[in-house]
Amino acid sequence: MGPKRFVSVGECMIEFSRETHSSWRMGYAGDTLNCAWYFHAAAAAHGWQTAFLTRLGSDPFSDQITAYLQENGIGVEWVRRESERQPGLYLIDTDDGERSFTYWRNHSAARLLADDEEYLREALLAVDAIFFSGITLAILAPDRRETLLGVLKEARRAGKTVIFDPNIREKLWEERSAITTAIMLAAAVSSTVLPSLEDEQRLFGDPGLEACAKRYADAGVEEVVIKNGGEDICVALQGAVQRIPLSKAVEVLDTTGAGDSFNGAYLAARLNGVEIVEAVHRAHAVASRVIGCHGALMPMDKISGLNSHAE
């Protein structure tokens, strides 16, 4: 039997995070890439290969992103290039650990990632687990959004684990009704959903954790894990709902990538057979370390303990 394969579908952007008033650090990030990064750090030692599915340009920055992914063990076999487009770019400012973003992504090559349906089907049916997000959906044209969801539905029917983080960013969508419709359609094709309570309450009006979990369980999601800004987490497994208390993070320097790192570490644990409560605690421990660093991606050699904890 060959290695198990995980693919994350979405956008990789050029990231500038402020270091001082006049200096910025450049990196590469994006919610689905961040998840892949932390998944790889935790799961590689347990036989998982991690790949990223996106589109990049033909410019030097796209070359650098591709090389960066390869150097850090993330496969690029499903990365396609566009001669007339480039990666998106964003700036992060922080105030007492809280983020604000400025984006340049309207001409991002990743907006075309679902333009070739057969290529998409070939990729997603070739792997064991697939991760995508609300941002993945938001950057696509409405008809391409339908294409991606259709292929993901096929993948789940074929026995693939399909994981979705709604990661709601209203500014990326054409209208509010499009968000709610797409989120619930995505949930219906997913095995696991990893929402954030604040986003869900703002968009769906859920009165609390349990109501949010029930809404997704009723949509056919087998496993729901509701992130709650470092507070108690709620999980629903096959419809059975429970709360999980969490320890408080000691230091918050930059919350960028906190939820994404939680996702990656959680999925690495669950896909390696760790039970759900233990997986939540492991993921919370990783996210607590990430918010003590600048930017979305901790260097692989600084993510200590992940491989030894994922079993």
Image (cartoon, rainbow, N blue to C red):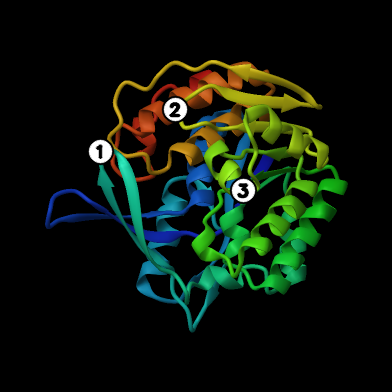
Amino acid found under the numbered disc labelled 2: Val
Report which quarter residue 177 is drawn in: bottom right
Viewer-side residue, 251 vs 148: 251
Tell me residue 176's x, y (percent): 62, 62
The crowd level at tag 3 (other Cα within 10 Å; few <14, some 14-19, many 20+) is: many
Tag 1's secondary structure?
A: loop
Q: Name which of mark 1 and mark 2 comes first in the sequence.
A: 1
Looking at the image, is mark 3 or mark 2 nearer the viewer? Answer: 3
Q: Is residue 43 left or right of residue 25?
A: right
Tell me residue 42's x, y (percent): 52, 30
Q: Are marks 3 and 2 in contact (CB under 8 Å)?
A: no
Tell me residue 112's x, y (percent): 60, 73
Q: Which residue is mark 3?
A: 166
Q: Which residue is mark 1?
A: 96
At x 79% / y 60%, what residue is drawn?
151
Which label sits on residue 9? Answer: none
Looking at the image, is mark 1 or mark 2 nearer the viewer? Answer: 1
Which label sits on residue 286? Answer: 2
Q: CA distance from mark 1 to mark 3?
A: 26 Å
Q: Is residue 217 left or right of residue 71?
A: right
At x 33% / y 52%, what residue is drawn?
100
Tell me residue 86's x, y (percent): 44, 74
Q: Is residue 219 left or right of residue 192?
A: right
Amino acid found under the numbered disc labelled 1: Asp
Tag 3's secondary structure?
A: loop
Viewer-side residue, 206 vs 287: 206
At x 54% / y 15%, what residue is drawn?
245
Viewer-side residue, 140 vs 65: 140
